[in-house]
Structures are given as C-alpha cells and as structure tokens.
Image: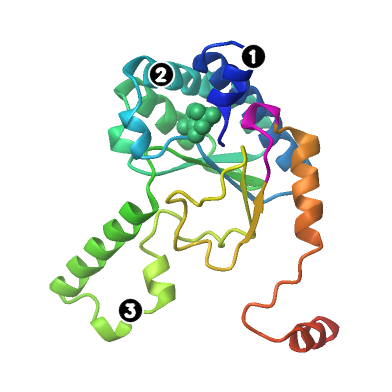
Amino acid sequence: MDGNGRWAKQRGLDRIAGHREGAESVRAIVRASREIGIKYLTLYALSIENWQRPKIEIRALMALLGRFLKSELDEMLSNGIRLNVIGRIEDLPKGIKRRLKQAMDQTAHNRDMVLNLSLSYGGRDEIVDAAKRISLRVKEGALTPEEITPEIFSAFLYTHGMPDPDLLIRTSGEFRVSNFLLWQIAYAELYFTTTFWPDFRREQLLAAIEDFQQRERRFGMTGEQVAFARKE
Ligand code: IPE
Ligand code: MG
C-alpha cells in the first residue's frame, strides 16, 4: 500500500491526511475482496524499516490502526473475516497489541476470508526467524537437516498453513518488491500500477484481477502442458 504521502502532497495536504485517506482504501479493499470471494488478503501496512519514519507519523499510523481495529471488528465478525497479523507483533505499542490480540481471538473461528495485516514485517527477517527456529529444532534432535524441504521450511514462516499469494499488487508507480513475502511470492503474478493507494478502490482492484485473469501461469511447465492439464 504505497503512495499515501505523495497523494497528500499533490493536494497540498500533510502526509497524515494521505494515511487517513489510505485507511479508507483499506476499508474499501477489504470489503470488496470479501464480496468477490478472495480467501486471503494480505496488506503490507508497516515494514520493519518504516519504524525509522518521524515519530509523529508513526504515532498517526498507530492511531489509524487502532481506530481501524475498533471500527471494523463488527464488520469482520458479521462477514466471517479472520484477522491475522504477520510480522514482529512484539514491536508494536502495548495498546495496539492488546487490541490486535482481542480482534484475532474474537475472529479466530471465521472461515470466509483471512485478512493478514503485515505489521513490523520484513521478508528477510521472516526467513531468518524461520532459519533460527529450524536450527533450534535440529539442535534439539527433533528434525534432521535432510528432512528440511521447502514444505517444512514454509511451515516455519508467519504464513504457515496458508497458500502462497496468486497476485501481488504494488501501487504508486514503484517497481519493487521491498522485502515483502520474499519466499511466498516465488510464483506470484506481479501487478504494478501508478495509482496512489488512497485512490486504489474497488474498481482498481477489479482491474488488477482482470489483468491477472489474462495471464498464463505455467509454474515452470510449457504452455502445451498447462493446456493439456487444464483439459484433463
Ligand atoms: C503508505 O504510503 C505506506 C505506509 C508505510 C503506511 P507512503 O507513506 O509510503 O507514501 P509515499 O511513498 O511517501 O507516497
Ligand atoms: Mg512509500
């Protein structure tokens, strides 16, 4: 979710106003995703690197997050949305952590869509954390190095038990992945748009999905193999 600051600057507003409007996009995209039957939606809300931003901006982002959790809980409950956090949740302020835990507990049984919020998230950090935990298991004798496969490795990531993303969308005209779900996006389709996040709403999401639907995903096979497998 990129481009809040530039969206605001274009209008002569401060960055916080951009984040506020960006939060409205979050609401719109969660709602639209649920309606069209997306099973997993992961939003990159805050990276580990984002902690370096000015204190006042961090404080505003946390306030928006707190407000979002409060205002959207009912909707998550009535729409079968399960909230989950990926990232170093321990880095977050106490009050936010408490609210996140409550929302995760209350929505734990929901099955229609998982809303993953990436908070204090870093892809390399996630992989390193997994490697650390795997080496501990090896040290304890619970796992042998030979048993470590991509599937086992995945089970140690924050996203364990979830499918890899099909589509990765980046807004605001940046053509980078910026440390997001590095392991999980191995076969994801990438979609880049110059639209700033506060302007990214239902219509823009549907356009991204339409684009995705035109792609041929081969997973390393030939086009003929894929066509044959589809007929089977
Ligand atoms: C929002 O956009 C993303 C967050 C980290 C919350 P930015 O704040 O990165 O906006 P730009 O890149 O300055 O336009
Ligand atoms: Mg940015």
Mark 3–mark 2 distance (CA, rounded to whole Å): 42 Å
Q: Residue at x 70, y 49 (%)?
A: 38
Residue 94: x, y in percent? Answer: 30, 23
Q: Is mark 2 within 8 Å of ligand 1?
A: yes
Residue that mark 3 sits on: 148
Residue shown at 24% from the left, 62% from the top:
133
Q: 59 and 16: which one is in front?
A: 16
- For marks 1 and 3, the one nearer the N-term is 1
Rendered position, 9 above or below 79:
above
Q: Which mark is residue 57?
A: 2
Between discs 3 and 2, the one toward the N terminus? 2
Decide whether residue 197 is among the magenta residues.
yes
Is disc 2 in contact with disc 1, using a CB cutoff of under 8 Å? Answer: no
- At mark 3, the secondary structure is loop
Residue that sits furthest to the left in the current view: 139
Q: Amino acid at mark 3?
A: Ile
On the image, the x and y values in percent for residue 230 come to 81, 81
Does residue 63 sit above or below 188 in this rendering? Answer: above
Q: Disc 2 on helix, strand or loop?
A: helix
The residues bearing labels 1 and 3 have C-alpha atoms spaced at a distance of: 52 Å
Q: Is residue 149 above or below residue 211?
A: below
Quadrant containing the N terminus in the rendered view: top right
Q: What stretch of residues is rendered in magenta?
A: 193-199
Q: Position of residue 111 (x, y in %)?
A: 63, 48
Q: Residue 11 — which label?
A: 1
96 left or right of 137 in image = right
Q: Nearer the viewer, residue 140 or 177?
A: 177
Instruction: Look at 45% across and 48% down and name the residue there.
Output: 178
Identify the image quadrant of residue 231: bottom right
Question: In terms of image quadrants, where is residue 211?
Answer: bottom right
